């Protein structure tokens, strides 16, 4: 089992004890609230990138939702802490540079979530109040739809022809995926002469579960790793550089919303809009219903929750929309989501099963992670046989014992979790499980440092660590050696062809080609993939070393600061810790690592093999805004909200969330915030537009 939580952010969340609720009421002081809000924003941004950019979420949806809810709650209690770049003020995540940007003519909004009947009722009451209906007004009807767990997509038709398809991106700007979408059979290329001049159809691209299962079967047959779940596979398949790959994946589409429309029939309700889309030839999910009161919504969602796995696509809840389009317009939207719609999220699924055993896996850093071996159980859309137990403390806290019946939860289809034992089923003779004292692989003693929550195998020659280090080095986050996966590593290690990551560049290919399963083509491909890694950026090599805590962002900082691996080797822990963006913890492990004999041997192998050991040319951005605070309010054309703040900070400035007398200038974008505008006016702070902002970044001066 891979150690799934090597990432410290992930550990911070996953190590939540079983007694802590999913989200909690914040009763923090203002300073604590500010610190926690910043921490949450960083975490949420990190997980946004993992989900939207890398199609590879690290935590279950429910955990992500809990982070957003906690931040929203802090911001509701302390509105002065809201920053314009807070994830609560923005939709989705960063936009990849792989695809051309597409500006949405009508913003692609997100949805607010509710998790209980009470919260749903609260939303319907807000709708009721927001509409301020007269006594004789017709009652509110709602359209209830399934919430498809796929990738939001906007399709633009002009004069009946599909001209553009885009992802949601940050809601204002998405990615141009037209070529890829043309390969999805369910999406019409042409909708006939009766179509309106302009029609934007929004919906969800998804991968049918049956197609996903078939894809995984062929992956397995080819000895390749299985895909995690249909949503991530759909996202990855859609955002391929090669449109032919997308076309071969069997993606499908459900339409659920109109974007821009010019011409077309008079539509007065969401249900009419969906019926009309169906008539035009768009796939519209048949599982939809107009209801007269919010009570009926719960009946529908309960039934869908019970039968969700009967469908050939994943759903993660229901979406309730005010049916009347006039009422939708009158309710309007917040900066992020419409007030007229709400997502009713399904609770994470739970099942009970037998805990057959608790074993310990050894990761690349030697970390010993206990995991549960379970009697296979179908939960959260797939069969679970293993679940991480994180560390010794977690096992003790949960007091799960081999032989117990345990409750397993799989939220968001990502990481299964053992919640705890069913005590009534426990064998009275059972004993608490004890963490092993010795490594299950190399029998070396296991050590738990005093300040650590984890236990480690400290034998650098432990075969499990070697295997994990080699896989990590060759993995996508590091040197990305195509075809050099778990099986190849295992075989090559077993055959004595490699033992450390430096050996990858000195493989005896004649011997390798004698091995079963390594024909001429496989060997040639492997050689080519390995050769290609010699040009990889220094940061990828640094990540690939597998040093604990040294992740991609610290590796980037080190490689551009020092410019060559030899400079890093020479640097002391203090020198490294003094660099902005590197904490003292990373600094001390990096310095210690480069003093070790193991690292010296590796470095000589890399040098002899001709690997790139140089960092990028350092572009020194002039510090034009040193000490100046520039507040940005409203949307800018050329910058995302975080992008604008980053540009200010990169030039030595600050980008606070509110205007004060110390503010140097306020940049006004589209729909600027009224409070910032008023404050700037009151204090006489210069207000500038985007063009002047660009000039300000360059020169540090305001236009005269
Ligand atoms: S309506 C302005 N309807 O859920 C409202 N969204 O978590 C736009 N989704 O971004 C969305 N099924 O990707 C709507 N029946 C449905 C949906 C749906 C899935 C997705 C969509 C949206 C996300 C919000």
Image (cartoon, helix red, strand yellow):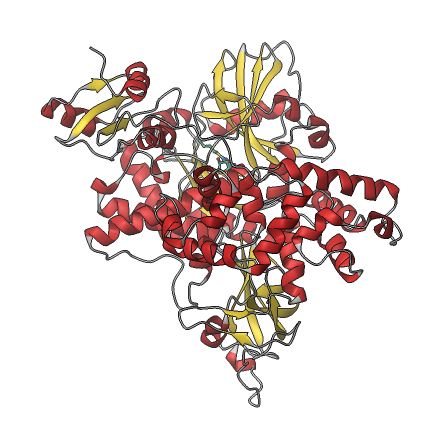
Residue at the spot x=50%, y=57% of the render?
595
Q: Position of residue 99 (x, y in %)?
A: 57, 25
In the image: residue 629, left or right of residue 285:
left
Give the number of callouts: 0
**Camera-nearest residue between 232 and 441:** 441
Quadrant location of the N terminus in the rendered image? bottom right
Residue 484 seen in render: no
Residue 401 seen in render: yes
Extreme-bottom residue of the structure: 429
**Camera-nearest residue between 520 and 508:** 508
Tell me if residue 451 comes above or below residue 648 in the rendering. below
Q: Position of residue 42 (x, y in %)?
A: 38, 45
Q: Image quarter for residue 133?
A: top left
Quadrant location of the C terminus in the rendered image? top left
Q: Where is residue 684 in the image (x, y as percent from the top left)?
A: 11, 22
Tell me if residue 361 comes above or below residue 126 in the rendering. below
In the image: residue 87, left or right of residue 144:
left
Tell me if residue 265 comes above or below residue 570 in the rendering. above
In the image: residue 440, left or right of residue 78:
right
Q: Where is residue 14 in the image (x, y as percent from the top left)?
A: 46, 60
């Amino acid at each position: 089992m891979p150690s799934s939580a090597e990432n410290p952010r992930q550990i911070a969340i996953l190590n939540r004890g079983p007694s802590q609720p999913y989200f909690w009421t914040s009763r923090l002081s203002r300073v604590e609230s500010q610190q926690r809000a910043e921490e949450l924003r960083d975490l949420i941004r990190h997980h946004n990138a993992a989900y939207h950019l890398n199609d590879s979420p690290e935590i279950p949806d429910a955990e992500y939702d809990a982070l957003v809810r906690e931040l929203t709650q802090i911001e509701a209690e302390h509105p002065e802490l809201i920053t314009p770049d807070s994830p609560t003020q923005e939709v989705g995540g960063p936009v990849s540079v792989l695809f051309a940007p597409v500006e949405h003519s009508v913003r692609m909004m997100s949805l607010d979530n509710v998790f209980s009947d009470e919260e749903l009722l609260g939303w319907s009451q807000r709708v009721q109040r927001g509409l301020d209906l007269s006594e004789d007004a017709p009652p509110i009807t709602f359209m209830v739809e399934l919430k498809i767990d796929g990738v939001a997509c906007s399709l633009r038709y002009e004069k009946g022809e599909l001209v553009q398809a885009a992802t949601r991106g940050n809601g204002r700007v998405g990615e141009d995926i037209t070529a890829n979408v043309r390969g999805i059979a369910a999406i019409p290329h042409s909708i006939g002469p009766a179509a309106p001049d302009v029609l934007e159809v929004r919906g969800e691209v998804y991968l049918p579960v049956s197609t996903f299962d078939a894809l995984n079967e062929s992956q397995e047959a080819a000895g390749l790793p299985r895909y995690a779940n249909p949503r991530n596979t759909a996202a990855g398949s859609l955002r391929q550089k090669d449109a032919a790959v997308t076309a071969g994946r069997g993606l499908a589409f459900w339409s659920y919303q109109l974007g821009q429309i010019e011409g077309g029939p008079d539509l007065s309700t969401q249900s009419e809009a969906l019926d009309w889309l169906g008539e035009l030839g768009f796939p519209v999910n048949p599982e939809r219903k107009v209801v007269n009161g919010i009570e009926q919504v719960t009946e529908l969602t309960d039934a869908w929750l019970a039968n969700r796995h009967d469908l050939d696509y994943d759903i993660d809840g229901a979406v309730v929309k005010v049916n009347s389009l006039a009422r939708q317009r009158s309710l309007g939207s917040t900066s992020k989501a419409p007030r007229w719609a709400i997502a009713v999220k399904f609770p994470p699924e739970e099942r009970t099963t037998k805990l057959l055993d608790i074993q310990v896996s050894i990761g690349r850093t030697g970390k010993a992670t206990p995991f549960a071996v379970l009697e296979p159980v179908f939960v959260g859309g797939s069969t679970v046989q293993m679940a991480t137990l994180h560390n010794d403390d977690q096992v003790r806290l949960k007091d799960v014992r081999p032989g117990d019946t345990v409750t397993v939860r799989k939220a968001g289809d990502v990481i299964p979790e053992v919640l705890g034992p069913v005590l009534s089923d426990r064998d009275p003779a059972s004993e608490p499980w004890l963490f092993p004292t010795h490594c299950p692989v190399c029998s070396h003693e296991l050590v738990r440092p005093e300040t650590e929550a984890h236990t480690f195998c400290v034998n650098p020659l432990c075969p499990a660590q070697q295997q994990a280090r080699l896989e990590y080095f060759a993995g996508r986050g590091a040197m990305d050696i195509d075809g050099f996966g778990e099986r190849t590593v295992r075989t090559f290690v077993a055959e004595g062809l490699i033992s450390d990551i430096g050996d990858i560049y000195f493989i005896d290919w004649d011997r390798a080609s004698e091995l079963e399963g390594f024909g001429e083509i496989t060997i040639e491909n492997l050689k080519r993939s390995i050769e290609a890694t010699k040009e990889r950026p220094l940061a990828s090599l640094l990540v690939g070393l597998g040093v604990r805590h040294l992740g991609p962002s610290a590796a980037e900082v080190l490689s551009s600061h020092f410019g060559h691996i030899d400079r890093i080797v020479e640097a002391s822990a203090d020198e490294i810790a003094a660099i902005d963006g590197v904490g003292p913890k990373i600094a001390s492990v990096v310095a210690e690592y480069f003093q070790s004999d193991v690292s010296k041997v590796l470095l000589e192998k890399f040098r002899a093999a001709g690997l790139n050991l140089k960092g990028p040319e350092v572009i020194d951005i002039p510090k034009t805004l040193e000490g100046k605070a520039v507040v940005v309010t409203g949307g800018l054309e050329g910058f995302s909200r975080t992008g604008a703040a980053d540009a200010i900070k990169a030039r030595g400035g600050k980008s606070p969330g509110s205007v004060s007398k110390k503010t140097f200038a306020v940049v006004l974008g589209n729909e600027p915030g009224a409070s910032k505008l008023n404050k700037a006016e009151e204090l006489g702070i210069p207000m500038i537009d985007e063009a002047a902002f660009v000039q300000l970044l360059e020169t540090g001066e305001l236009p005269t």
